Image (cartoon, rainbow, N blue to C red):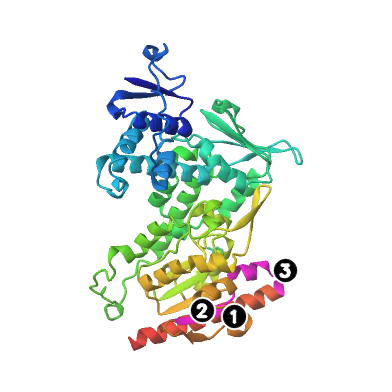
Amino acid sequence: MHYITLDSDTDFNGWRKAARTLALNQVKPADVTWTVQGSEPELFAAPRDALPPETPEGRFSVSARFVDLAKSAILHRDPERFSQLYGVLWRLRGNHDLLQVATDPDVARLQALSKTVHRDQHKMKAFVRFREIGREPKSRYVAWFEPDHHIVEATAPFFARRFADMAWSILTPEVCAHWDGHAVSITPGVPKSQAPTQDRLEETWLTYYASIFNPARLKTKAMQSEMPKKYWKNLPEAALIRPLIEQAERLSGAMIAAEATEPKRSQRREAPMTRPVHADRDSVEALRDQASHCRACELWKDATQTVFGEGPQRASVMMVGEQPGDTEDLAGKPFVGPAGQMLDRALAEAGIDRGKVYVTNAVKHFKFVPRGKFRLHQKPNSAEIKACRPWYEREKASVRPELVVAMGATAAQSVLGKTVPITRSRGYIIKLDDGTHVLVTVHPSYLLRLPDEQARAREYARFVEDLRIVAEHLGKAARAA
Ligand code: URA
């Protein structure tokens, strides 16, 4: 039996070196016991038969795919992961295509470990909340987080890129990560009592959160599965969630009571008997899942997640924006921040029900530069728009809208396949060679940025006018059908 002791729970290089030597010496997985320094049972404390000697002439290689899988699976808390990884490595020597066999139990187990780790990393990216300690320019931002797996070191570079200008620390029970503007350092974990609880920006954040909380889109179950309760205790906004939900329930209760009238029989339309038109692979749900792994450009690296389009699978209008903003990036949903509220208001004024509209963006990841605690929006470039265009094309093919509304220059570039001046192209319906009807208009953020109130009111009215053209076109299309 060979007893291998790794330096730490995340010692991928140690595992790799040992696994390579063991495999070259033909040591079977059943003859290896893996442990981590500090957690060896008494039995292993004495020096043991560790690694066999290196075989200098021996070589074998594994695919980059296995290395990626192993690098994430090793971060799982399961104590069996080292031997499971070695088991798959052992089998890969005789079967290079093993990883393609998704039904193989060993492969499936590793993939499940890796998926769980990715999910935990995603939660960390979404739910870490920094609190400011001290005053500028000497302040430091400190967050407390309780990950399920050994993900802190692997996820720290994400925070270093995103909050490059801030000095920050993420404290966790097992290890802490720190950033001083130049390098990430890792120190042992601390108890929760060392985590800060208050900061001066928190009040602003809470006010903002309450203002973007949209009771019309309240889906408590989905919200709880995306933001599981275990994270609530560390989120400053969590204290607001229950009162906001209760308020929303009161409001919707009142609305239901007020609208309890039966439609006249002649006005009522029976739901058409339809079957799903698309094979599963092309449904919006399936596309969303595929896009969540998109690496077609570099923007995924700093963004929290892919923000895919949302709306009914069959929608007569598809509204396309530029890219998710800060709020959308965190929420994973398009147009839920200030620009989204502006859009909701304008759609309602034009007589269009947002619930029936499919809303998406030309670019599905948030592009920004970090500025202290904030992330400043950056316009996507042509290469990024082009890299993301296949998702728009596939969404359009899946939803098959009557009309696509391109809001702003980036959306117009993606939808029309070329750059156009918005001022000259807006407000009328264009028919593309493939039969798609398109209307170009301004982006709602443009309205938010206008400094003078009069100009804002004038431009907002023009935006609503453009949306009325949309409503009219849909009315005509429905009558013709
Ligand atoms: N701006 C956009 O273009 N899209 C969003 O989802 C939010 C803001």
Residue situated furthest right in the rendering: 137
Near-viewer residue (203 or 59) = 59
Helix, strand or loop status at disc 1: loop
Instruction: Sort mark 3 into few (<14), some (14-19) or many (20+) by Cα contacts within 10 Å.
Output: few
The label shown at residue 420 is 1
- Mark 1, other Cα within 10 Å: few <14 / some 14–19 / many ≥20: some
Residue 236 drawn at (x, y percent): 56, 42
Magenta-colored span: 437-454
Numbered label attached to residue 416: 2
Quadrant hosting ligand 1: bottom right
Judged from the image, the secondary structure of the residue bearing numbered disc 2 is helix
Eyeballing the image, is 263 above or below 226? Answer: below
- Which residue occupies 56% across, 45% down? 158
Question: In which quadrant is the C terminus drawn?
Answer: bottom left
> Looking at numbered disc 3 in the image, what kind of residue is underneath it?
Pro
Q: Of the numbered discs in the image, which one, if any, rests on residue 378?
A: none
Real-space Cα separation, disc 3 to disc 1, in angstroms: 25 Å
Between circles 2 and 3, the one closer to the viewer is 2
Q: Amino acid at mark 2?
A: Leu
Quadrant location, the N terminus:
top left
Residue under the point 36% across and 83% down:
478
